[in-house]
Amino acid sequence: MARLLPLLTSLLSIDVSLLVQQTRRNALLYAVIALFVLTAYGAGVAALAVWLSAMMSPVAALGLVAALALAIALFVVIILMVKNRADERRRREAAANHRALLMTTAVSLLPVMMKSRPLMAAAVTGGLALFALRMMGGSAGENDPPQT
């Protein structure tokens, strides 16, 4: 085992250094790609504005391009809001399932705790502490109105 440890550490250091080198290279290349994509986007918007200005006044063409960009941004915001609402609903369902699982576990452990006085005392003390915390408003549940 003593001979294996230096070999393993050298292998791990090689893998880590390769990973760091690859991550740096990828970050640099992605930055260059992002620069060219943004340049292409800007040139495309400018080309659209110039093309539209041949059909209408330049001010109207720029206004149309701005309105189109605003509409796309609004569409993306709406999609984001819908996705966030769905994620929040999934989180609430997962929390409810987690609470149900905890309650099932607690009920299944009740016979064992009833036989052991120390466990029963700990459970009663924990329950009283939770009750006191809820009564003092220390932990708001999901169905409770927000406290202001």
Image: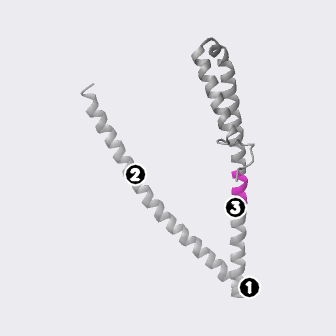
Q: Secondary structure at mark 3?
A: helix
Q: Is residue 47 above or below residue 102?
A: below
Callout 2 amino acid: Gln
Look at mark 3 in the image and give the residue it sits on.
Answer: 77
Q: Residue at x 72, y 75 (%)?
A: 67
Q: Secondary structure at mark 1?
A: helix
Residue 78 counted in the magenta span: yes
Crowding near the residue tagged with mark 3, few <14, some 14–19, many ≥20 C-alpha atoms within 10 Å: few
Residue 69 counted in the magenta span: no
Q: Is residue 128 above or below residue 30?
A: above
From the top left corner, tell me how far across and down residue 32 is, in percent: 46, 65
Q: Secondary structure at mark 2?
A: helix
Look at mark 2 in the image and give the residue it sits on.
Answer: 22
| Secondary structure predominantly adopted by residues drawn in magenta | helix
In this picture, residue 147 sits left or right of residue 14:
right
- Distance between the alpha carbons at the discs numbered 3 and 1: 31 Å
Q: Quadrant of residue 121?
A: top right
- Which of the marked residues, 3 or 2, is nearer the chain's N terminus? 2
The residue range painted magenta reads 77-84
Callout 1 amino acid: Met
Mark 3 vs mark 1, foreground winner is: 3
Quick one: 50 or 10, which is closer to the camera?
A: 10
Q: Residue at x 62, y 23 (%)?
A: 123
Q: Residue furthest top?
A: 115
From the top left corner, tell me how far across and down residue 139 is, in percent: 65, 41
Callout 3 amino acid: Val
From the top left corner, tell me how far across and down residue 4 is, in percent: 28, 28
Look at mark 1 in the image and give the residue it sits on.
Answer: 55
Mark 3 vs mark 2, foreground winner is: 3
